[in-house]
Image: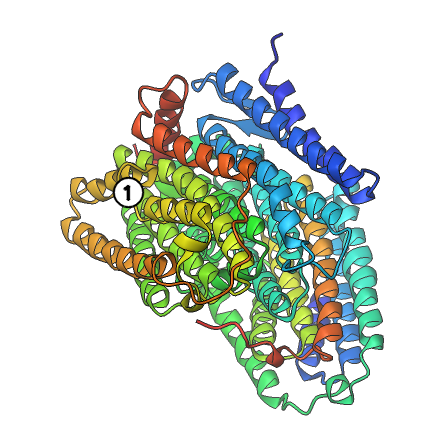
Amino acid sequence: MEFTTTQLLYFILALPIIFSVTAAANVLSLPLLHWADRLTATLVAGAAGLLLITFNPDMPVHDGYFYIDALSVWMLLIISTLYLAFAWTSKAYLERDTNIRYGYLRRFTHLEGRFYALSHIFVWTMMLVVLVDSLGLMWVTIEATTLVSALLVAFKFTRTSLEAAWKYVMVCTVGICLALLGTILVYYAQLGALGGDMPLDWAYLAEHGSELNPRLAKMAFCFLFVGYGTKIGLAPMHAWLPDTYSEAPSLTSGMLSGALCTCVIYVLLRATIILMPAVGVDFIGTMSIFFGLLTIGIAIPFVVVQRDVKRMLAYSSMENYGLMVAGFGLFIPMAVEASLLHMMNHAFVKYILFYMAGTIVETYSTKNLMRIHGMIHQAPRTAMFWLLGIVGILGMPPMGVFFSEFYILAGFFKANHPYLGILALVLLAGMLIGILYHAMRMLGGRPKRKAAGELMGRVDALAMLVLLLGSGIVSGFIHELPYLGELLTKAAGIVMGGAL
Amino acid sequence: MQYLVVLLIFAVFLQTRMTGLKRAVVCLAAQSGIIACACLVVGFSVGGGLHAVLPGLLTLVVKVIFIPGAMLRLVKKITDDREITSTSRVNYSSLAAAVFLVMGYLLVDRLFPGIEGRDIIAASILMIMTGLSMMVLRKRAIIQMCGLITLENGIYLLGLLITEGLPMVVELGVFLDVLIAAVVLVILTNRMSLSFMTTDTTVMRKLKG
């Protein structure tokens, strides 16, 4: 059977909603609910795979309010793979969390339906972000992701999770309001230069970007950068990020870190492509590299003195966002391609790490990493995947992150910023020392605390393994792989589009 | 339109001086009501049709009736005396608002020299800055929510004036988002008053570093 891109699109967008409504209505029994969750995500990911095969990267599809080109397909693939991983690990996670002996949610029952409904709607809004065609709708969907995920962050309704959720909504909404101001300014510039046709339409604006008023465009870019930068978690607007990631349920932290922030970077990229000809590459590049490196620099001391496992991972996420933004700011095809690849690698590996952190927290019923020792003896499988994830996120070969980080750093030298490249290397080395120190302490030593035993099951271990292998294989052999290599090159071409 | 701007600035100044929660919410509703009127005035001056009436009506339904209504229901549940009226000094807030207004005029003259509706843009900058300062400086959750809506109103007014309204779909989406944001914040505040016994956000300072 042959499907057109539009049919696949409607299929991808319809299924999660149908499932969420069913889950929220609480009509399914628990085993059935778990299977329906897996089925939905598998079908959606399958449809996304089909979309990749049938999609021609040279021919963007513009249909109604949807616009699909190579960049959006790349993002859609990242999101739907995480969605798949979410669905195949959620049963194990929820069973642990509601376990009568040690689970966080043991005092509540029947929360599974609500958790599934919110999570699937969250994924659905993220998919909308990468599929809609205008800057205005991108803003609307990004704000929607904040609101849906806020309920997920506060899901346990403990005091600390409420604090985190409150901070998250307040800081991010202010940031996003500034981005709305930026979007309005883009529209004003469009009205002045091009008239009222195709308001805020991305493809139309990207074609006519050079006609916008430079002063207005610069102002709009500043607002958009600060606004979306807040939501990405760039320093100094990152106050909400570690709190939110550490207090959310682990699966949600993984989604927030892997998928949501990359979605926001995607929107910032779309806006940048439009404004690049009018604002100038130098200004945008300087801003991106400066704030990117600042973010890495600020994250390091917090990692070194950290006591909370998930906060440590949150600061590591900040480091990776900083690196991605700096990579895009270099504006050479190699670095942009590597940054896009890094989005995928970071998403996969960070999902694994947050999932493992959740498992470790349940095993030892503490978040304090100073109290965890000797994981290798007490929970060997958990320890092994934790080690693999840590090695992966630090960018050691042969893990996927190694390739993307290597090309981004090479990009610094190729783009004639050798001193910045050295600075980035030093910063990354600091990060490596901080994280490795903590992780090794947790793995080795003599166990001092009673553990709940080995909590990793077969299905979730397999899902972790697939994610790790996928990230490694895709980044190592990207240009030998069918479809994906061409897609990535085309996506990087779109990001570079305004600069040429 | 001139009268509306004067009324609006008056409402924002009044907003900075409110110490009682209930009055602050009523004041917010009044401010949103003025914005709704401004929407209708701008809409009819540009031309009739659905796009002229809809934003005004939506503002009326969402920001004047629904959100303040939900917030008032929340306020009724709060029984702690210290919260219903606070002793925090508000004179500095009003002074700050005056400074923001002057700054607004200076900014307009620099950024958009000779634009039509200079006063309205200055008023919207006043609202954006006042909303921000209310969210940062005030401690009680409900007042912070008022600040957020004030900020949102300010941006909306600015957009209405310089672009005569965003595209229809985007505008509907913005309203939907404001609506959901209010619902989410009300849920969180409700939970906060259940588990902390107060909606004063200064008690939430456990997460650091």
User: Is B204 drawn above or below residue A443 in the view shown?
Assistant: below
Tell me which residue sits at (49%, 60%) in the image: A241
Mark 1 chain? A
At mark 1, the secondary structure is helix
The image quadrant where one finds the C terminus of chain A is top left
Percent of width and height locating residue B34 = 75, 65
**Residue A150, can we see it?**
yes
Compared across the picture, whether A406 is left or right of A91 comes to left
Closest to the observer, B76 or A215: B76
Compared across the picture, whether A113 is left or right of A140 comes to right
Tell me which residue sits at (63%, 38%) in the image: A124
Percent of width and height locating residue A233 = 45, 57
Closest to the observer, A251 or A188: A251
- Crowding around mark 1 (Cα neighbors within 10 Å: few <14, some 14 to 19, many 20+) is many
Residue type of the residue flagged with mark 1: Glu
Percent of width and height locating residue A277 = 35, 39
Dividing the picture into quadrants, the one containing residue B180 is bottom right
**Residue B138, can we see it?**
no
